[in-house]
């Protein structure tokens, strides 16, 4: 039987003509379009586009629906880690966040997970996530939240960074208004490293979290997410509370429970941009 031996020199020679599978430049040019192709996409903030309207600076939504996030001290940046090509928002851990108030535009962030326009029924739910770097391992910080943690009755969904517990994991939380469920991601988070963090809710089945492609699942009987009055915030739990210290890039929110294959594809197709 003939055995084909990999010719590394030939691969390198042809890399100018044939696209490498793992290359930061290729991931950089395709990352935005990959996110824009997510089904059920409600909002997408790559942190590359910012506008100033009447002195109010916003991180622009590139999902096409205009759900821009108003800046409070957060700064536009290009992530200093990985390949150094990723657009990012930087949060200093003191008074920085991006926010869009609840209400208006048909309650854009009020995703219940029971949206009747989503078929098949198995795809109803919610998926949210981003690429992020934390620069602090000592506190409980909000990353992407529609949840104030003041009362379950008025909390909807959130991704937190738990630097206050062993292993410094990320967590994904959802609430029905009467009950809540939280799933904890992989332990061992480090500073100065990009993490792809995605949370998914499948009504009456599970809440799941992915941390750099590693999935953790928690069963739940919760059938829908409460329609709360909390604001949608990136970089804090709510304005002024549990503020995040680090970088966020490619943040997205979908009114659909994306299949495992799409979540894994998103990670694999963009990871080179972040040096993972």
Image (cartoon, rainbow, N blue to C red):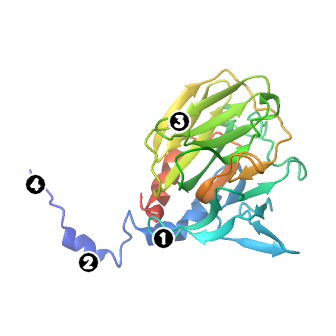
- Report the residue marked by disc 3: 165
Q: Which mark is residue 2?
A: 4
In the image, residue 55 lies at what x, y percent? Answer: 85, 74
Q: Is residue 59 above or below residue 260?
A: below
Q: CA distance from mark 1 to mark 2?
A: 25 Å
Q: In which quadrant of the rendered view does residue 4 lie? A: bottom left
**Disc 4 vs disc 2: which is toward the camera?**
2
Q: Are marks 1 and 3 in contact (CB under 8 Å)?
A: no
- Report the residue marked by disc 2: 13
Q: Which mark is residue 84?
A: 1
Q: Earlier in the sequence, mark 1 or mark 2?
A: 2
Q: Tell me the residue at 76%/47% (across/down).
A: 238
Q: CA distance from mark 4 to mark 2?
A: 24 Å
Please tell me how crowded label 1 is: few (under 14), some (14-19), or many (20+) other residues with Cα within 10 Å: few
Please tell me how crowded label 2 is: few (under 14), some (14-19), or many (20+) other residues with Cα within 10 Å: few
The one nearer the camera, 222 or 82, is: 82
In the image, residue 76 lies at what x, y percent? Answer: 65, 70
**Disc 3 vs disc 4: which is toward the camera?**
3
């Amino acid at each position: 039987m003939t055995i084909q031996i990999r010719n590394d020199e030939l691969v390198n020679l042809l890399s100018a003509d044939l696209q490498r599978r793992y290359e930061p430049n290729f991931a950089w040019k395709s990352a935005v379009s990959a996110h824009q192709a997510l089904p059920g996409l409600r909002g997408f903030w790559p942190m590359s586009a910012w506008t100033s309207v009447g002195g109010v600076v916003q991180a622009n939504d590139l999902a096409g629906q205009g759900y821009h996030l108003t800046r409070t001290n957060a700064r536009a940046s290009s992530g200093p880690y990985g390949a150094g090509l990723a657009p990012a928002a930087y949060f200093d851990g003191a008074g920085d966040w991006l926010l869009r108030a609840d209400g208006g535009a048909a309650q854009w962030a009020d995703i219940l997970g029971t949206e009747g326009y989503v078929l098949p029924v198995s795809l109803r739910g919610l998926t949210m996530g981003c690429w992020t770097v934390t620069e602090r391992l000592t506190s409980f910080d909000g990353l992407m939240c529609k949840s104030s943690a003041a009362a379950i009755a008025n909390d909807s969904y959130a991704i937190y960074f738990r630097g206050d517990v062993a292993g410094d994991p990320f967590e994904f939380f959802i609430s029905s208004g009467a009950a809540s469920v939280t799933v904890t991601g992989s332990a061992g988070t480090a500073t100065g490293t990009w993490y792809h963090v995605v949370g998914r809710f499948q009504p009456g089945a599970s809440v799941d979290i992915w941390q750099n492609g590693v999935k953790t699942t928690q069963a739940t009987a919760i059938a829908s997410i409460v329609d709360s009055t909390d604001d949608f915030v990136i970089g804090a739990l709510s304005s002024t509370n549990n503020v995040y210290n680090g970088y966020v890039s490619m943040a997205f929110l979908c009114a659909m429970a994306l299949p495992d294959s799409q979540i894994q594809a998103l990670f694999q197709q963009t990871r080179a941009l972040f040096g993972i």
